């Protein structure tokens, strides 16, 4: 598949599967991992590996490695101020068997960051799926659909950076690895 100005997103040798995401630090990661364990007791399914917990901002997919440098240079217009993200809601989607944690209110800088990334990537010729941005942290896959107890989730995540993540698909679940992170604007 070749996009407008020559960016190739195709399955071939020499490609990497990548996406932009928020990648939590140790404290938030531990709190989300604990929430995932509680969630799994209700929903069953398979937990996200603790070291793979993230919030996807823009999924790109397979790209030729020789265009990776372009993804490693997000333009200044993408960057928003740092922000506080409160994950105070959790639930599951019946259609895809995902158990998630999410904010009940999406902070403007989070919405802007995702929109800026999308605008930049589309403008650069990457083909992204048309999906409304529904920020969530996937905690469990292949989950049963069941109600979760109310008011069990409140995680305060100070988001100071975003990252490009490499995804390695494996039979027991994808492995994710941060390729690079960029600081958001501080003290705005
Ligand atoms: O962050 P989560 O787990 O919600 O579902 C995939 C995963 O989402 C999603 O990108 C994240 C990292 O793999 N994803 C996979 N394929 C996708 C696609 N074609 C996709 N998102 C949008 N379009």
Image (tube, rainbow, N blue to C red):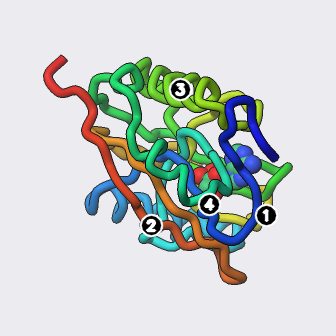
Q: Position of residue 48 (x, y in %)?
A: 56, 68
Work out how far the residue at label 1 is from the one at label 4, CA to CA, in angstroms. Answer: 28 Å
* Left/right of residue 111 with respect to residue 181 in the rendered view: right
Secondary element under disc 2, as helix, strand or loop, is: strand
Task: Name the front one of labels 1 and 4.
Answer: 4
Task: Name the front one of labels 4 and 2.
Answer: 4
Find residue 144 and name its label. Answer: 1
Density class for disc 3 (Cα within 10 Å; few <14, some 14-19, many ≥20) is some
Density class for disc 4 (Cα within 10 Å; few <14, some 14-19, many ≥20) is many
Work out how far the residue at label 1 is from the one at label 2, CA to CA, in angstroms. Answer: 28 Å
Density class for disc 1 (Cα within 10 Å; few <14, some 14-19, many ≥20) is some
Q: Counting residues from the N terminus, which is met first, the one under dot 1 or under dot 4?
A: 4
Residue drawn at point x = 76 percent, y = 62 percent: 11
Task: Name the front one of labels 3 and 1.
Answer: 3
Q: Counting residues from the N terminus, which is met first, the one under dot 4 or under dot 2?
A: 4
Mark 4: C-beta under 8 Å from nearest atom of ligand 1? yes
Task: Single out the residue that lies furthest toward the bottom.
Answer: 171
Residue drawn at point x = 60 percent, y = 63 percent: 16
Residue drawn at point x = 85 percent, y = 49 percent: 95
Density class for disc 2 (Cα within 10 Å; few <14, some 14-19, many ≥20) is some
Q: Are the residues flagged by discs 3 and 1 in contact, CB closer than 8 Å?
A: no
Task: Name the front one of labels 2 and 3.
Answer: 3
Task: Single out the residue that lies furthest toward the right.
Answer: 95
Q: Which residue is mark 2?
A: 177
Q: Which residue is mark 4?
A: 17
Residue drawn at point x = 40 percent, y = 61 percent: 178
Nearer to the camera, 16 or 27: 16
Work out how far the residue at label 3 is from the one at label 1, CA to CA, in angstroms. Answer: 37 Å
Find residue 120 and name its label. Answer: 3
Q: Position of residue 129 (x, y in %)?
A: 75, 37
């Amino acid at each position: 598949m070749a996009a407008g100005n020559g960016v190739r997103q195709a399955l071939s040798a020499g490609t990497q599967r990548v996406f932009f995401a928020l990648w939590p630090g140790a404290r938030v990661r531990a709190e989300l991992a604990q929430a995932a364990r509680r969630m799994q007791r209700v929903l069953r399914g398979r937990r996200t590996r603790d070291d793979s917990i993230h919030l996807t901002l823009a999924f790109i997919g397979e790209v030729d490695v020789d265009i990776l440098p372009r993804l490693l240079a997000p333009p200044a217009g993408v960057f928003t101020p740092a922000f506080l993200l409160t994950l105070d809601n959790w639930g599951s989607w019946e259609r895809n068997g995902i158990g998630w944690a999410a904010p009940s209110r999406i902070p403007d800088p989070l919405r802007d960051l995702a929109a800026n990334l999308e605008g930049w990537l589309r403008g650069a010729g990457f083909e992204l799926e048309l999906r409304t941005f529904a920020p969530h942290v996937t905690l469990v896959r292949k989950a049963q659909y069941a109600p979760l107890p109310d008011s069990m989730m409140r995680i305060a995540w100070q988001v100071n950076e975003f990252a490009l993540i490499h995804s390695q698909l494996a039979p027991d679940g994808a492995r994710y690895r941060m390729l690079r992170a960029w600081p958001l604007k501080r003290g705005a």
